[in-house]
Image (cartoon, rainbow, N blue to C red):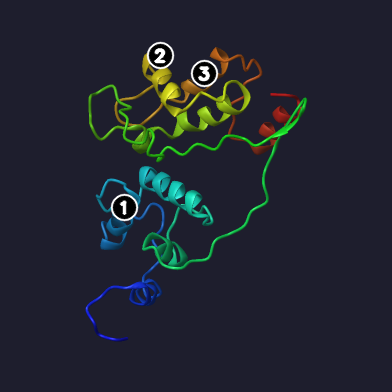
């Protein structure tokens, strides 16, 4: 390429094609993981864990990329502001008694709340963006079915108030049953079985 000392779109595009894919659970401390963390606003520690993956997923969603949670050539291009390939997905709807509506799809990395504290220890590193995945997913459900004004902020506040925010590992599993009961989801089912989940949904859970 022309040697002009400028890292322009052509240079970055060529460079992206030479970089390795960066995968979830890569704890090697490599410069590639750190680069991804810097570009998606995650803690730069070289460990591609759950929090980094959440930020990557948020970036992929807002950028129209396939939400894999990992970084490949197309993702590198998007991260650097170069031309990349977007995907087109059919609009998903949630059936209701009076028609259908688009479900809420919050991201814990959303700038509206990602830096808000979500901690019981006072740690500045514990925020909704770093460890609020559970409350954020429940906010999707609550905002879709109960009140569109509900956000991850309210869900995290509930988790803290009711004692479900742990010191180091995010949100306790008991949070989900508790919040479901608090908002009137009487047929709450928690399971690891896909078959059980499908059966519960079919039965109206």
In the displayed structure, would residue 182 be above or below residue 125? Answer: above
For mark 3, what is the residue? 179
Q: Work out whether 5 lies above or below 156.
A: below
Residue 13 drawn at (x, y percent): 39, 73
Badge number at residue 37? 1
Q: Are marks 2 and 1 in contact (CB under 8 Å)?
A: no
What residue lies at 65% left-to-right and 38% top-to-bottom?
194
Q: Quadrant of the C terminus?
A: top right
Specify whether 80 is left or right of 187: left
Mark seen at residue 85: none
Q: Label 2, secondary structure: give it.
A: loop
Q: Is residue 10 above or below residue 171?
A: below
Between label 2 and label 1, give the one nearer the viewer.
1
Decide which of tag 3 and tag 1 comes sooner along the chain. 1
Q: Left or right? Give the position of 51 relative to 191.
A: left
Residue 106: % across, % down:
50, 36
- Asked whether disc 3 touches disc 1, contact meaning CB atoms under 8 Å apart, the reply is no
Query: Badge 2 is on which residue?
Result: 162
Please name the residue shown 27% across and 46% down the image.
43
């Amino acid at each position: 390429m022309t040697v002009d000392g400028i890292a322009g779109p052509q240079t970055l595009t060529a460079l992206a094609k030479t970089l390795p894919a960066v995968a979830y659970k890569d704890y090697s401390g490599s410069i590639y993981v750190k680069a991804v963390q810097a570009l998606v606003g995650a803690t730069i520690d070289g460990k591609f864990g759950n929090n980094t993956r959440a930020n990557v997923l948020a970036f992929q969603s807002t950028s129209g990329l396939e939400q894999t949670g990992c970084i490949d050539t197309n993702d590198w291009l998007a991260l650097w502001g170069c031309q990349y390939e977007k995907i087109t997905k059919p609009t998903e709807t949630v059936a209701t008694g009076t028609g259908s509506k688009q479900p809420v799809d919050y991201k814990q990395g959303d700038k509206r709340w990602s830096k808000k504290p979500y901690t019981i220890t006072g740690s500045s590193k514990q925020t909704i963006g770093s460890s609020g995945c559970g409350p954020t997913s429940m906010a999707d459900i609550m905002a879709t079915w109960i009140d569109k004004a509900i956000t991850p902020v309210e869900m995290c506040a509930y988790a803290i108030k009711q004692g479900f925010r742990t010191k180091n590992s995010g949100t306790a599993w008991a949070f989900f049953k508790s919040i479901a009961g608090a908002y009137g989801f009487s047929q709450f089912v928690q399971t690891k079985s896909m078959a059980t989940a499908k059966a519960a949904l079919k039965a109206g859970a």
